[in-house]
Image (tube, coloured by chain):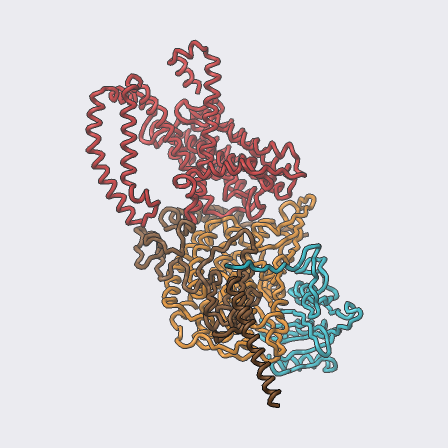
Chain colours: A orange, B red, C brown, D cyan
Amino acid sequence: MPLTTEEMILNMGPHHPSTHGVLRFILRTDGEVIYSCHPDVGFLHRGLEKIAEKVSYAQFMPYTDRIDYLAAMNCNLGYAITVERLAGIEVPPRAEYIRVMVAELNRIISHLISVGTFALDIGAVTPFTHALRERERVNDLFEELCGARLTYNYVRFGGVAFDLPAGFLEAVSSFLDYFEPRLAQFNRLISKNKIFKERLWQVGAISAEDALGYSLAGPNLRASGIDWDLRRDESYSVYADLDFEVPVAGTEFGQIGDCYNRYWLRIREMEQSIRILRQCVAAMPAGPFWNRSKRKLKPPPGEIYVRTEAPRGELGYYLISRGDDRPYRMKIRTGSFTAMSIVEKMSPGLMVADLVALIASLDVIAPEIDR
Amino acid sequence: MESFINYLFHKIGFLQQVGYIPTAAVLMLFFCLLVLNFFGLVAGFLTFFERKLAGWTNSRRGPNRVGPYGLMQFVADGIKLILKEDIIPATADQIYFKFAPYLVLLGTALSFVVIPFGPRWSISDLNVGIFYLIATGSFTVVGLIMAGWASNNKWSLLGGMRSAAQIISYEIPNALAILVVVLTAGTMSIQGIIKAQSGGIHHWLLFSSPFTFLAFFIYGISSIAEINRIPFDIPEAESELVAGYNIEYSGMRFGAFFAAEFGNIYVVSAVAATCFLGGWQIPLVEDVALLDPIGLAVGGFLGRPPVLAVLLLGALPCMYLAFTALRAFIRDLRAKYHYRGSRFVRLNSEFLVLGLLFAAVALIMVLHVPLRGWLPEIYRLVFQYLLPFLSFFLKAMLIAFVVLWLRWTLPRLRVDQLMGLCWKYLIPLGFFCLIGQGVWMYLFAG
Amino acid sequence: MRVRDYKVKFTHGISSYFRNIYESVSTIAVGMWITYKTAMFERKVTLQYPSHDPLEGRPKDQILFPDGNPKLPFESLLGAGQSYKGPLSPRISERYRGLLGYDEPKCISCLLCAQICPIDVITVKGVKIEGRKSKAPVTYTINYAKCMFCGLCVEVCPTDAVFFTRRFEGATFDFRSLVRDFISGELRRERLRLAAEATQKAAQKKKREDSDETGNF
Amino acid sequence: MQILDILSKIKQRFGATDLVWIDDSGAEPYLAIPRESLRPVALFLKEDPQLFFDTLMSLSGVHQIGEPEGLEVVYHLYSIRRRHRFIVKVRLERPLAFPHFYLRVDTVSDIWPAAGWMEREVYDMFGIHFMGHKDFRRLLLPPDWEGYPLLKDYQEPATYQGISTSREEVEPEEQR
């Protein structure tokens, strides 16, 4: 019979070092072991869906940066594809390659933040700063490309805002040459560390059924053993022309769907992103970078649901147009939202320290939940 | 320290007029203050060093704004902490809340009573010294639980309880490892343990037998756990408990916890150096007592005026040669590492080094003249006390460096894994060492 | 409720016991070697900002990744990738989106920037005056407190009158000072006067024409 | 499975009486169903071995103004195992009197657990009640917030708990 004590209500957040962004968890615990956990979200709710109804299509682009500010390019891209499909705008091939390139660069730095903060939550500080150090390089690249380091507002309907600056492709491949051994070093520093593995193995294992039922997406879904990637299975942009693998959790590490699998999947995705980037650099076509549309864009009436593979999983835009210059309704479905909803189910029985690992492994970020 | 007081008492006539007891009392108080200041200084330096190391491992520079190379950073931190408002939560248990940090600090400061500084040089060489150290270590637990409980904060409480469970568990392997040392040395006195390791580097307990070698690591791991450092810092695990037991503390009360933590690093490093690295024994020197006549001889030799003149004249060309060599060496180094320091130092580093050397030599030369009669004594003291002290301090700092270095490399264990490590790994290994060392001694030494 | 059983791999037999010890020691040693290497041999990436202003262009030996970066002596020992060669050094880029700047003579008060701005950062008013082809601005206000540096205004401006400077230090103690009108009071009054005269003239002219017309009628 | 096959399968099971298949140009075709048949249809979609809609991509509310005014709940479904998608819409009337009585839909949160939070969000933004939901509260907005912001006729309150929701406009100082 397990020994239990009086239960205690713990208020974790909104200001807590391991709640990425501003989150709050109301925990009922027995000492260290959690009975139940109720996430309280909405601290970063900015009403983006309402704003979308008030500004024009082009004006909403900077707001998509703020959906997931760690992967602004991917959010830009998803929105641009949605509007392009609705309005029937053609994108020149150079722009498509540039888009894939920036999206994959952004996936790398988003995953770097993810694995870095993961290590930080487990208690290792150095991997975090090493990850940030690598991320700064990509930020430099982006600053060179579009002038901003975080909220890029770079993708446009029918192309991208700026052409590549001189020497950019060389800089990207130079970065990749620099980054690949660094990633291996990062793995040796933390991923292979015994303590780190012991902390994550068999913790918070999400079964495939749960992952599907809770509509987990992206790395979290693949870590539960489901071979599903929107880039490959619902291919958009030029991903169909590119050669890459979709890493799926196997049995080589602990239990399928546990925290370590989710962590390790992100590392492997970065490797695949490097592969995609090398192909992009090699295959970058010449030509126009922006098929400029009319200034006042008025898509025909209709509705569309487009989803793309953002670093935090499926990023879906449900757009209803009534033929005006502004969306009639815009619903943004994000990966973190569903990932957060599973915490309630997974947390009972975990320890407080494991909850931190679980949240970090799901890679939720508060602005994406709240929008 | 009594021996030193006795020495002074007999050497200085004035003190004999005052009488032994007042002299001893005043001198003892003076030395205690000295040691307390040493404690503060070492703790402060370690905080600075930790931040610098954190910077380096993270490809940053670390503190570099206050003083040369940021060395004065801890002074600035201390001033900041003193000036900060001391907030006491309204619902906290006022007395315990106020008292807890000082209890923790007291535990650390009491350890310094037996920490040696050189042969016969410690505040008091208790015959149960190492036992006393383990006992004072437990003050910390009481202080931490008190802080955690009195804060009236659930996170603090969790931190306090975690620290209690952790520290009390890890006392066992800690004590077992120390027991191996006591078994080998045959005494619990700190100086006795160090003396037992005299006779060269292979007599240091770290290298003397495989079991003491293992015991060193058991001691190291368990003492890191006892002072709540990563990978065992679960009582103040930042990403889990925010700051654990000191979550509600601010100002100098927080500073007291902080100082105690870093003082503790020095204490455990010093104990490790004492027990396993031969304490103040100097490598390649069989016995420190042998340095005594060397000091006397060197002092007597240097006390002769012609020697001084010859040395001074001989030193100048040597210094010139050294200067050119140094200059070339620094150039090379700079080219290799793209050294970037402050502009002044970059341009003038050779001159600075040379100037410092000159100044030091000149100072020694000048001081030699009036101190001629005392020179043998001074050199004896240098060889007898200062060199061993430096040896000891460097050993302790080396271990402290490893402790800090571990903190910037490793993630943190979970509570149950922490206990598993203690009870399933360290304690069995500790007993294994204890028995093994007994057998070893029976076979080889006894 | 079900408390999950924490059977960590610590307990599975004697071989895993020693394998655990071996793995812990070896991986920790590898990690410590990496941090040691980073601490001792690798270049620091800190940009000591106020003492080294990125706008000024730092001294040659202070640039972190110069072209033709010499390799470190321990390169082969430490593994590849120690030196990052690239034309992009950490500096303020050409396209950097700093605080918005405004070039008054170029402005034609077309209101495109004010219209595209999603958060009404820019307020423009223009008047028609003589001797100028387009409208002349009498108010051009940028509210830096609101601006999110999205760059839409710069993108649409046909004459590059509004542009991004490379300034980024805009901190202030009073957010009212972040609202700036780029047209000086003097110029505004002058232009308003000119505009009023012009409208008067036009009105008079129209009146005259009207009266002419009526006369003709 | 093609989308029309899915449709015919549903019609086969439920009869075509109250299911309306809408295939506008410019939009993906969808199935409009009355709210009473939502749960049976959803269960069928989830559990039929050939349809097997295992994930709920998105659950959104829409306020359709104009004639006739009403709210819609849109279910975007996808089957990762069978690789096909399907859209189901439930249309709700929104009369001026007693809107709460009419804005009611059965929950699907026990069929697709992901719907749990999505339904809470729709309630938060549109005021649609999901009957049978286990933990039905506001999700993003504070519990004492008044009104449902994504309705087209929503008026933002001037203050919330005494705090103004707008900021004063600042007049620039005159430049010289």
What residue lies at 63% left-to-right and 67% top-to-bottom?
A50
Relative to B36, residue D169 above or below: below
How many numbered callouts? 0
**Quadrant, the N terminus of chain B:** top left
Asked whether residue A248 is in view, the answer is no
Q: Residue furthest top?
A: B17
Q: Position of residue B416 (x, y in %)?
A: 57, 45
Instruction: Report the side of B380 relative to B220 (left or right).
Output: left
Asked whether residue A6 is in view, the answer is yes
Q: Position of residue C89 (x, y in %)?
A: 38, 59
Q: Residue furthest bottom?
A: C217
Q: Residue furthest right?
A: D97
Instruction: Report the side of D88 relative to B445 (left or right).
Output: right
Relative to C154, residue C62 above or below: above
Q: Position of residue B356 (x, y in %)?
A: 30, 34
What residue lies at 33% left-to-right and 45% top-to-bottom?
B343
**Quadrant, the C terminus of chain B:** top left
Q: Position of residue B224 (x, y in %)?
A: 49, 39
- Quarter holding residue B353: top left
Closer-to-camera residue (B395/C200): C200
Relative to C173, residue A241 above or below: below
Closer-to-camera residue (A10/B271): A10
